[in-house]
Amino acid sequence: MDKVKFTEMKHGDREDYEFLTEHEIEYASKTAERLLAAMVDLDESLSGYQVTRLGHSLQAATRAWCDGADVDWVVSALLHDIGDIYAPYNHDEYAAAILKPFVREQCAWVVEKHGDFQKLYYAHHVGGNPHARDAYKGHAYYDDCATFCERWDQNSFDPDYAHEGIEFFRDMVEQVFARKAYDPAVIRAGERVDLTDPTLASERNT
Ligand SMILES: [Fe+2]
Ligand SMILES: [Fe+2]
């Protein structure tokens, strides 16, 4: 069998759907590879900045790494703008949807809201609301999103910052997307992990 027998889903039988499940497992196992390739496509996305979107993403992830952040944070920093390609008006939600099954709830939330938090830095120049983040005041991850934007996102447009290349992050991306989707041990609902770890940071910066 190399294709299902049905042309309408309602006519599929157990054999068809078992075959498709196998296929999906195989396809899903290559998610990390496809995401890394998509990151390279970001090199050609929206310019006007002094760095490409890929350069910006690599800077953000390198800063996370240098801060001693754990793998969930580093991969979230790397992919936080991946939505720019297909969802320019809700790129944050798009990226969060990709990450949600595989990283801590905290990281997915921060990626989902980072667009609103970033407005603090520029919205007043374009007639927007720089305080859009106020809508989330009191949320458990509010401070984490503020830190994410301040330390890793808003400052990662510097053509002189020496960042790691995409290959540096390959193993981390593979590790995260090889996890069991929505595993409660990964999602760790409600748990906060600091974005920075000074001990790890000093090890990584030597
Ligand atoms: Fe963004
Ligand atoms: Fe960004």
Image (cartoon, rainbow, N blue to C red):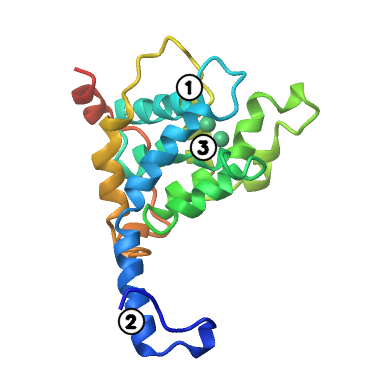
Q: Nearer the viewer, residue 52 or 108?
A: 52
Which residue is located at x 54 percent, y 14 percent?
A: 50
Mark seen at residue 92: none
The residue beneath circle 1 is 156
Element carrying mark 2 = helix
Q: Is mark 2 within 8 Å of ligand 1?
A: no
* Quarter of the displayed picture in which ligand 1 can be seen: top right
Across and down, in percent, residue 152 comes to: 45, 28
Ligand 2: does it lie within 8 Å of the C-beta at label 3? yes
Q: Are marks 1 and 2 in contact (CB under 8 Å)?
A: no
Question: Which is closer to the viewer, label 1 or label 2?
Answer: 2
**Is ligand 2 closer than 8 angstroms to the Cβ of mark 1?**
yes
Residue depicted at 47% across the width and 34% down the height = 41
Whether residue 48 is visible here, answered yes or no, is: yes
Callout 2–callout 3 Cβ contact below 8 Å: no
The structure residue drawn at horizontal position 30% and vertical position 79%, both measured from the top left corner, is 1
Inspect this view and state whether residue 141 appears.
no
Tell me the residue that label 2 is attached to: 18
Q: Which label's residue is closer to the chain start, 2 or 3?
A: 2
Alpha-carbon span between mark 1 and mark 2: 46 Å
Q: Quadrant of residue 62?
A: top left
Q: CA distance from mark 2 to mark 3?
A: 35 Å
Ranked by sequence position, the earlier of labels 1 and 3 is 3
Percent position (x, y) of residue 127? 81, 28
- In the picture of the structure, the residue carrying the numbered disc 3 is 81
Closer to the camera: disc 2 or disc 3?
A: 2
Name the amino acid type tagged 3. Answer: Asp
Which numbered disc flags the more N-terminal residue, 1 or 2?
2
Horizontal side, residue 44 vs residue 20: left or right:
right
